[in-house]
Image: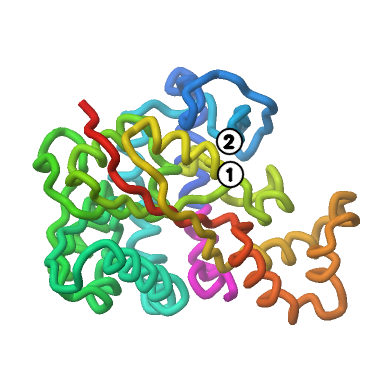
Amino acid sequence: MKETAIRPKNQLQNYEKIADKELGRLFGDETNLVKINCPACGIDAQKERFTAKYNQLYEKCSCGTVYLNPRPDYAAITKFHSESESANYWSEEILKNTEEARKDVIWKQRMEYVAEVIYKNFDKDYIFRMLDVGCSIGTSLEVLRKSAPKGSLEGAELNSRARRICREKGFKVYNSIEGGKIEAESYDIVTMFEVIQQSFYTDKFLASVCKILKQEGLLILSFPCIDGFDYFIMGKDHPNFSFPQINFFSKDGMSELLKKNGFDVTEFTTPGLLDASMARDYGMTHCEDRFKDCYLMKLLLGEDGEKNVNVIQDMLRSSGSSGHAFLVAKKAHKIK
């Protein structure tokens, strides 16, 4: 899959121009930035640091997690997601206009997997209740409605524009899962796709998820896994290292975070689609010593490099080496 299928070049450039102005203001005032401990293990034990755009400083913890530190405070992050111009543009101009392509190349595969997980844990005649946290414009819910028609599907979304689009599709959508508006132990399943990496209070956020899940309910989430091949190749140049992406968990770091918040991990896969393509594009414009000893990069940059992209991507997926991870966890105990 080509990245331009879901992120058209012109629209992406427009988005980046809008985001550049907003992030310049957001990070220009250091009084709005706060320091935190590792969002996975909770300790302050950094191994290394690197700087991204707007002097955003990322730290790598001893558990493998990479996180933005310092970062805008909780109120600023919430406001950015709910009403910033760039968040609105992403919802209305990129997600909405590429929705059909995203259904084909991303969501169909993801929701088939989600349906498989659901029916592995629940009877096919059971009318389960599911909440998609960070449901955006509701594409995931639309696709899953076809794969799991007996489910009661709902969403939660901070951004008002995306929330409106999702509601127009007939889904019930909450503004947030925090604040006690959702009844405790009311959902069989909670899904979160590319959400946890944007959360300020990861412990508080997951405690809220645990609270609304029934006993032995399922959490299905996807996240950018820092152990992935694309992060190894691109390093600090990876385009994901930019606000609002503020947490990049390792497999071990994510497992530790979930365990301390009441979940037992039952499945871990990496069904990514873009690692090999992104690594090849990066390697074509960057001559770096670490590529010399990387057999996969030799294949991607060689004469048959373009032909090798799909083969290598399949290998990365099957070996758990993609930078896009999927995880299933079961609620293990109550969080007070």
Instruction: Judge whether 215 appears above or below 333 on screen.
Output: below
Residue 57 seen in this snapshot: no
Q: Do the residues labelled 2 and 1 touch (CB within 8 Å)?
A: yes
Residue 302 seen in this snapshot: yes
Q: Does the magenta stretch include residue 12?
A: yes
Q: Is residue 36 magenta?
A: no
| Residue type (three-letter) at the residue carrying disc 1 | Phe
- Crowding around mark 2 (Cα neighbors within 10 Å: few <14, some 14 to 19, many 20+) is many
The Cα–Cα distance between marks 2 and 1, rounded to whole angstroms, is: 10 Å
Image coordinates for residue 254, horizontal then vertical, percent: 48, 40
Residue shown at 16% from the left, 33% from the top: 179
Q: Is mark 1 on a helix, strand or loop?
A: loop
Stretch of the chain drawn in magenta? 1-16
Q: Name the residue under label 2.
A: 66
- Crowding around mark 1 (Cα neighbors within 10 Å: few <14, some 14 to 19, many 20+) is many
Residue shown at 49% from the left, 27% from the top: 41
